[in-house]
Image (tube, grey):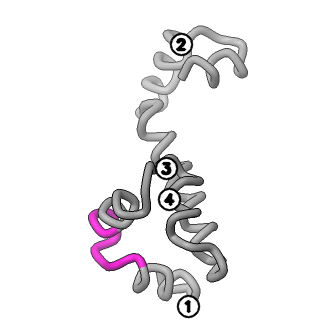
Amino acid sequence: RKYVARELAMSVATLSRRLAEEGTSFRTVREEVAWNLADALLTNPALKLEAVARSVGFNDAAAFCRALKRRSGCAPSEYRRRLLAGLR
């Protein structure tokens, strides 16, 4: 948060307050951005899950796979297939 607030030329408290005014939080925005990036990366079949996981902030592919399964309700391979087919 500190880095983002500094880049936006505001304090962390102001950033938090403005996000709250919009009905969201830094954590929610960060997670949404990370999952959008994960979706974009998963559409590249040449990228391994480990690379996607690390790119969006997970320490390992196993943690990413568990989180993706909780989020999507299916295995990462199935989720990737759906993304590639445009089904999501």
User: In what element is the residue under mark 4?
Assistant: helix
**First in sequence: mark 3 vs mark 1:** 3
Is 86 or 80 nearer to us in this picture? 80
**Residue 27, x across and y down, in percent:** 42, 35
Magenta span contains residue 75:
yes
Label 3, label 1: how far apart the Cα atoms are: 22 Å
User: Within 10 Å of the Cα at label 4, are there few (<14), some (14-19), or many (20+) other Cα atoms?
Assistant: many
Label 2, label 3: how far apart the Cα atoms are: 19 Å
User: In what element is the residue under mark 3?
Assistant: helix
Q: Amino acid at mark 3?
A: Glu
Image quadrant of residue 3? top right
**Residue 61, x across and y down, in percent:** 43, 63
Q: Amino acid at mark 2?
A: Val
Please name the residue shown 63% across and 25% down the image. Answer: 4
User: In what element is the residue under mark 2?
Assistant: helix
Residue 84 vs 20, above or below: the answer is: below
User: Within 10 Å of the Cα at label 2, are there few (<14), some (14-19), or many (20+) other Cα atoms?
Assistant: some
**In this rendering, position of residue 48 left or right of residue 66:** right
Per the rendered image, the range of residues in magenta is 69-76
**First in sequence: mark 1 vs mark 4:** 4
User: Within 10 Å of the Cα at label 1, are there few (<14), some (14-19), or many (20+) other Cα atoms?
Assistant: few
Q: Which residue is mark 4?
A: 53
Label 4, label 2: how far apart the Cα atoms are: 27 Å
For the stretch drawn in magenta, the main secondary structure is helix
Q: Which residue is mark 3?
A: 32
Image quadrant of residue 15? top right
Q: Are the residues flagged by discs 2 and 1 in contact, CB closer than 8 Å?
A: no
Q: Which residue is mark 2?
A: 12
Label 2, label 1: how far apart the Cα atoms are: 40 Å
Q: Amino acid at mark 4?
A: Ala
On residue 85, which mark appears? 1
